Image (cartoon, coloured by chain):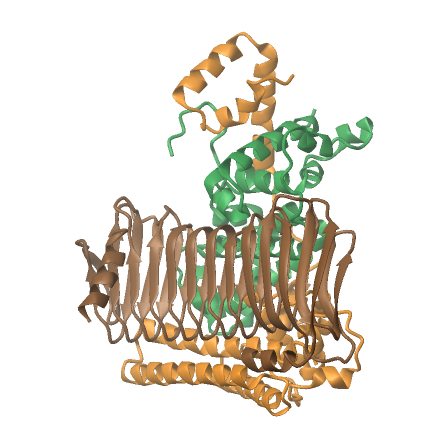
């Protein structure tokens, strides 16, 4: 059954029809048992969909998540994050940057750079691709939200940026812009810290400081994904 | 930077390439460039036409795969290419445009657009679906588009006009100006710059406007239902209409308009926060400028 | 919105409620509020509790929206992103609502990068044809959930967002970058196609 009325049945169910249209449809339904049956089926489809229960994933995803965010999962498992991430194209979304930076800090720069690089089919020698990122010694826990890990994250990324500049991989005007932007953020951080020292209980200031620090990390991460857009 | 590259390139012979390839609906356009520009204009033909101005040492490679048309320049000497692309592509075609020292411009698209450059402007008119526009050193502008919008630059301004859909807009040093927005989810932040928003406040929606050094001005439509949270450290709050503050702490307070079902957060450390009715903010800004 | 029509109007819009119903572990309340605050300050165990309480909801949404193959990956992304963004969560909406919205954003961003966006909005009969493209016997025995998964991308997304997640057409249109009319017609086509897979 397919006619001009059928197409309006969903709108009718959802209360989307105007008064006149609804009246006309109801009049038609009264004399069309097939239409009534279709309407009833559509109503059951909606009810059936709403009755579907949520199911957890077949495998526990927590260990992999814990590893990515740098917290202990209890059951340790080795996951090749570089391989995992390299499957994806970096499109500079915040989520991907955060994840990529987590890789950067957890695995050291070589693997991280591979993961960050847009071209995953790139077969150039590893040594060439590593340029621009300072090697990381040891493993740094990601986003422990302690100032120590924040400071080391910033230091790592700043070192990488510096090397990008020295190696000439980053255009000097771009480095200047990035550096100025970092100065802008740093002065905002200093102001927020000072304000917070005077008023440690302020929820706004706490939040604002955290937000601004996060912006700095994010800018550094983005900057490092740029390093050699090509070599 | 661009000028330097341009000066070098005049020493070599420039060449024109003009290639047209047929495409099927569903195919995507990928363009990769180093220096120069990528200009894409949408047309109503199922074909992609690539017109490129480039060095005679470079060759323009237009590759047609099963799902993509990819455009890039290949250089015999491995030097950075400077190519000016003028591309015509079907309105339905999703596109993925990458450049380094490249300006990117898209006009009339009706599909998703990803545009990323390091040193250059990004200007997109039209677009629908996933719209992701990024630059480091260059202004980003999006007009007449709808979908999921994600816009980022580091040191220039972001401008959105007549845009609907979820919006995320960020810069570090630059103003963010949003006009004619229709959205239930807007997240805007800059460190050093003003934030201006003129658009819908939808029931149940969430809106966040934050800056450190700059003013925040937001228009609230007459019949909006929104709970507004305002925070500033060194600035003032000013509203064109009466509000009654319900909840206040040292640097933050909130109030409810209508049923309060939407949430709006307005924050600036050093600047002022203004609320007005649609249209008034623009006039006010204009008058302020004239006063100076 | 006034709901005066005789249709089905009880929409599941509160993900917290749903999370409680499904798993019982993470359905809002003071314990969850405390976990959110703890997680925001870097407590991994608190975040794990939030994960346990909400993973079924997020995973089911991902599975329905972009299919079982990508659902694990997307779910991981959602929680990683949630962890990094927790500092910006101010507790004004329920955590579940915030997470759900985040999940939808991640999913919608992902489907483009997977290249699944093309040709997703078919008009008219194409949509109806797409589901019953298998032998009739299979078709009848096809599980309802599986049938949803076999809808064309556009119709499936609209169906999930409207009939299962409770979004309105104009919200869906915004999210997907389509006009509300397209959302309505896709929904209707999806429902018409799914009638065949109702339990008999």
Q: Residue at x 72, y 82 (%)?
A: A129
Which quarter of the figure is the N terminus of chain B placed in?
bottom right
| Percent x, y of residue B158 | 43, 65
| Percent x, y of residue C171 | 47, 44
In this rendering, position of residue B290 left or right of residue A24: left
| Colour used to depict chain C in the structure image | green
| Colour used to depict chain A in the structure image | orange
Most extreme residue toward the top is: A31
In this rendering, position of residue B81 left or right of residue A26: right
| Colour used to depict chain B in the structure image | brown
A120 relative to C137, above or below: below
Give the camera-side residue of A218 and A197. Answer: A218
In this rendering, position of residue C39 left or right of residue A132: left
Give the camera-side residue of B44 and C104. Answer: B44
| Percent x, y of residue C176 | 55, 46
Q: Quadrant of residue B54?
A: bottom right
Q: Quadrant of residue B101?
A: bottom right
A123 relative to A49, above or below: below
């Amino acid at each position: 059954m397919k006619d001009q009325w059928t197409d309006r049945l969903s709108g009718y169910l959802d209360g989307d029809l105007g008064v006149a249209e609804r009246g006309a449809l109801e009049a038609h339904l009264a004399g069309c048992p097939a239409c009534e049956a279709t309407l009833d089926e559509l109503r059951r489809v909606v009810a059936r969909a709403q009755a579907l229960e949520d199911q957890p994933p077949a495998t526990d995803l927590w260990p992999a998540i814990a590893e990515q965010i740098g917290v202990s999962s209890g059951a340790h498992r080795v996951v090749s994050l570089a391989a995992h991430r390299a499957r994806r194209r970096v499109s500079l979304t915040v989520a991907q940057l955060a994840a990529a930076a987590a890789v950067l800090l957890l695995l050291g720069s070589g693997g991280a750079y591979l993961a960050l690089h847009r071209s995953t089919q790139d077969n150039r020698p590893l040594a060439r691709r590593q340029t621009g990122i300072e090697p990381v010694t040891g493993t740094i826990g990601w986003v422990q939200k302690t100032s120590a890990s924040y400071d080391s994250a910033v230091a790592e990324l700043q070192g990488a940026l510096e090397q990008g500049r020295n190696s000439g991989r980053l255009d000097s005007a771009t480095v200047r812009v990035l550096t100025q932007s970092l100065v802008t953020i740093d002065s905002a951080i200093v102001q927020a810290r000072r304000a917070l020292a005077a008023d440690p209980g302020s929820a706004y200031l706490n939040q604002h400081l955290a937000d601004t620090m996060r912006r700095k990390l994010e800018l550094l991460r983005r900057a490092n994904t740029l390093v050699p857009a090509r070599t | 930077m661009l000028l330097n590259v341009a000066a070098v390139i005049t020493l070599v012979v420039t060449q024109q390439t003009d290639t047209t390839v047929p495409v099927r609906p569903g195919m995507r356009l990928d363009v990769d460039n180093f220096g120069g520009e990528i200009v894409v204009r949408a047309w109503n033909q199922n074909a992609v036409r690539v017109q490129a101005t480039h060095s005679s040492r470079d060759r323009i490679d237009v590759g047609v795969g099963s799902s993509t048309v990819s455009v890039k320049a290949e250089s015999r000497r491995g030097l950075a290419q400077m190519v000016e692309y003028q591309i015509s592509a079907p309105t339905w075609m999703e596109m993925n445009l990458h450049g380094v020292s490249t300006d990117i411009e898209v006009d009339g698209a009706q599909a998703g657009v990803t545009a990323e450059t390091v040193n250059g402007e990004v200007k997109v008119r039209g677009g629908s679906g996933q719209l992701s526009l990024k630059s480091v050193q260059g202004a980003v502008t999006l007009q007449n588009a709808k979908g999921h919008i994600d816009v980022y630059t580091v040191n220039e301004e972001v401008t959105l006009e007549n845009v609907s859909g979820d919006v995320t807009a960020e810069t570090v040093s630059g103003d963010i100006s949003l006009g004619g927005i229709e959205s239930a989810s807007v997240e805007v932040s800059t460190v050093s710059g003003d934030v201006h928003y003129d658009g819908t406040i939808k029931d149940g929606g969430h809106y966040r406007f934050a800056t450190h050094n700059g003013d925040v001005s937001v228009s609230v439509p007459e019949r909006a239902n929104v709970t507004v949270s305002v925070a500033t450290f060194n600035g003032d709050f000013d509203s064109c209409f009466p509000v009654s503050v319900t909840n206040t702490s040292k640097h933050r307070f909130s109030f409810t308009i209508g049923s309060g079902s939407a949430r709006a957060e307005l924050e600036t450390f050093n600047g002022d926060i203004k609320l007005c009715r649609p249209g008034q903010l623009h006039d006010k800004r204009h008058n302020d400028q004239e006063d100076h | 919105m006034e709901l005066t029509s005789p249709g089905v109007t009880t929409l599941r819009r509160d993900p917290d409620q749903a999370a409680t119903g499904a798993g019982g572990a993470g359905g809002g309340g003071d314990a969850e509020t405390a976990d959110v605050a703890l997680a925001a300050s870097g407590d991994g165990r608190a975040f794990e509790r939030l994960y346990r309480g909400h993973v079924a909801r997020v995973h089911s949404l991902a599975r329905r929206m972009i299919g079982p193959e990508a659902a694990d990956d997307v779910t991981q992304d959602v929680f990683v992103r949630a962890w990094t963004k927790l500092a910006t969560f101010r507790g004004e909406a329920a955590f579940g609502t915030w997470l759900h919205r985040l999940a939808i954003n991640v999913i919608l961003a992902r489907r483009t990068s997977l290249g699944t966006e093309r040709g997703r909005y078919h008009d008219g009969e194409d949509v109806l044809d797409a589901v019953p493209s298998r032998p009739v016997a299979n078709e009848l025995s096809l599980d309802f959930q599986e049938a949803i998964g076999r809808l064309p991308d556009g119709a499936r997304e609209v169906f999930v967002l409207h009939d299962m997640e409770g979004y309105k057409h104009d919200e869906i249109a915004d999210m997907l970058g389509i006009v509300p009319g397209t959302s309505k017609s896709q929904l209707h086509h999806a429902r018409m196609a799914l009638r065949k897979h109702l339990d008999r």
